[in-house]
Amino acid sequence: MLLTPTLSKRVLEDGLEVYTFYKYSEISKLLHAKHTYIGAKVFSQLSKHALVPFAKEFENQDIFVLPIDDHVRSGYSHSAVLAKGISGYILPIYGALRAKNRIRYSGQKLSTRQKNRRDFKLTCRGGIDVILLDDIVTTGNTLTEAKNCCEKANINVLFAITLADARE
């Protein structure tokens, strides 16, 4: 069936577990819609089909979702749209994990990603449990950097969720 998510887990080098719902090749055209005017609708539907059933498992727990760099560009933030989709089950903390580096990583080579770290700024209180949320895991560098930033602020990162894994 079209858009039927298949939950899988990838463990990054630092031990961070990343749960994904699609192979990148299955939804790459939909993911690239984030650069178009219909992107918010596409990401809303992807959240509804993949993330919401997963998020229901965490309802009524004292856990927050932390969207990666939910800075608004081109009218909306794709990570904020994903977080809004699950907000009935896991409370998002918007605007708390922002990249100071504004370089776009979409379509860039690994060397560019490695030379230009996100340099996250965190603006939420410590002593909480969070799930990191992003659209794609490629190298894992962004999620690892976000996790390290959270841990320095005494925030416990339980795991990360993304729509797709670029490693197939």
Image (cartoon, grey):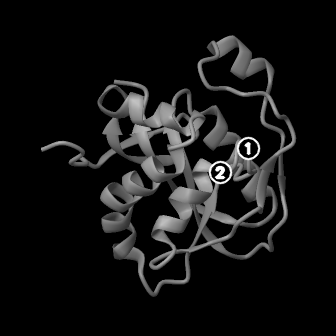
Q: Quadrant of the C terminus?
A: top left
Q: Residue furthest front?
A: 37
Q: Residues within 10 Å of mark 1 (few under 14, many from 20)?
A: few
The residue at 85%/35% (across/down) is 101
Graded by Cα atoms within 10 Å as few (under 14), some (14 to 19) or many (20 or more), the crowding at tag 2 reads many
Give the residue at x 43% y 47%: 42
Q: Position of residue 155 (x, y in %)?
A: 71, 66
Q: Foreground: 133 or 17?
A: 133
**Residue 116 image-quadrant placement:** top right
Horizontal side, residue 48 vs residue 160: left or right: left
86 up-or-down from 82: above or below:
below
Where 56 falls versus 156 (above or below)? below
The spot of residue 89 in percent (x, y) is 45, 78
Residue type at mark 1: give it.
Answer: Arg
Secondary structure beneath disc 1? loop
> What's the residue at 83%, 39% (across, down)?
119
Residue furthest out toward the left: 1
Which label is found at residue 77?
2
Q: Which mark is residue 73?
A: 1
91 left or right, relative to 99: left
Amino acid type of the residue tagged 2 in the rendering = Ser
Q: Is residue 90 left or right of residue 80?
A: left
Residue 152 or residue 106, whichever sits in front: 106
- Report which quarter residue 34 is drawn in: top right
**Image: 75 above or below 139:** below
Q: Nearer the viewer, residue 61 or 46?
A: 46
